[in-house]
Amino acid sequence: MTQLQARSVRPFTGRHMALVMVSFFGVVIAVNVLLANLAVSTFSGTVVENSYVASQEFNQWLGAAKADKALGWKMAIAREGADTVRFTLSDASGKPLTGAAVRAQADHPLGAKAPVVLTPREVAAGVYEAALPAGRWHVGIEARAMGHVWHAEDDAL
């Protein structure tokens, strides 16, 4: 008899199956608890402060978005170094939008950091720069020029 043949094979019993099932569901439950805890600790769940008020203003938001789109203005946004953001604004014909009064606000996508109010200044024709800390940001911008007010948003940062 060889050494391999001398070993006895133990049968797979109900106790083994119970251990497999408890282990499997223990891992599933542990992962679910971990992910739920991470989700709750990183996102408040608040999209708007008051959904009733937001629903009343929805048609006004749609009208403003149509007016913004009708202007045909465009915005390109990019990082300049670690702590500067650059907005390049152009009108419907692609010409630089110069002399605009620009305001912007950067919000952290998950609300982990406080919003940052930006005061961009024009550094070249149609190019506006402002200081913005490193990180991921959702940026909303308002430009006033030629008697119009235009809004845009970007998640590129």
Image (spheres, rainbow, N blue to C red):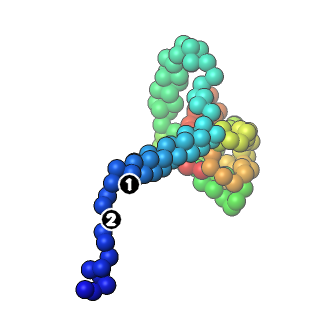
Q: Is residue 97 positioned above or below 8 on the image?
A: above
The residue closer to the viewer here, 80 or 26, is 26
Q: Hey, which residue is sitting farthest bottom in the picture?
A: 2
| Residue that badge 2 annotates | 10
Q: Is residue 109 visible?
A: no
**Labels 1 and 2: the sequence-earlier one:** 2
Image coordinates of residue 89 in percent, x first then y, are 58, 45
**Image quarter (top left, top right, bottom left or bottom right) of the N terminus:** bottom left
Image position, residue 46 (x, y; %): 60, 28
Q: How many marks?
A: 2
Q: Residues within 10 Å of mark 1 (few under 14, many from 20)?
A: few
Image x and y of residue 83, in percent: 72, 56
Q: Residue at x 73, y 39 (%)?
A: 114
Q: Which quadrant of the structure image shows residue 43? A: top right
Q: Secondary structure at mark 1?
A: helix
Q: Nearer the viewer, residue 151 or 48?
A: 48
Type of amino acid under label 1: His
Left or right: 1 in relation to 152 = left
Label drawn at residue 40: none
Identify whether 65 is placed above or below 27: above
The residue sitting at 51% across, 19% down in the picture is 58
Q: Tell me the mark number nearer the camera, choosing from 1 and 2.
A: 2
> On the rendered structure, is 6 left or right of 63?
left
Q: Position of residue 115 (x, y in %)?
A: 71, 38
Q: Which residue is mark 1?
A: 16
Residue type, mark 2 in image: Arg
Above or below 58: residue 100? below
Number of residues whose C-alpha sits closer than 10 Å to that of mark 2, classed few (under 14), some (14–19) or many (20 or more): few
Image point 51% across, 30% down: which residue? 68
Q: CA distance from mark 1 to mark 2?
A: 11 Å
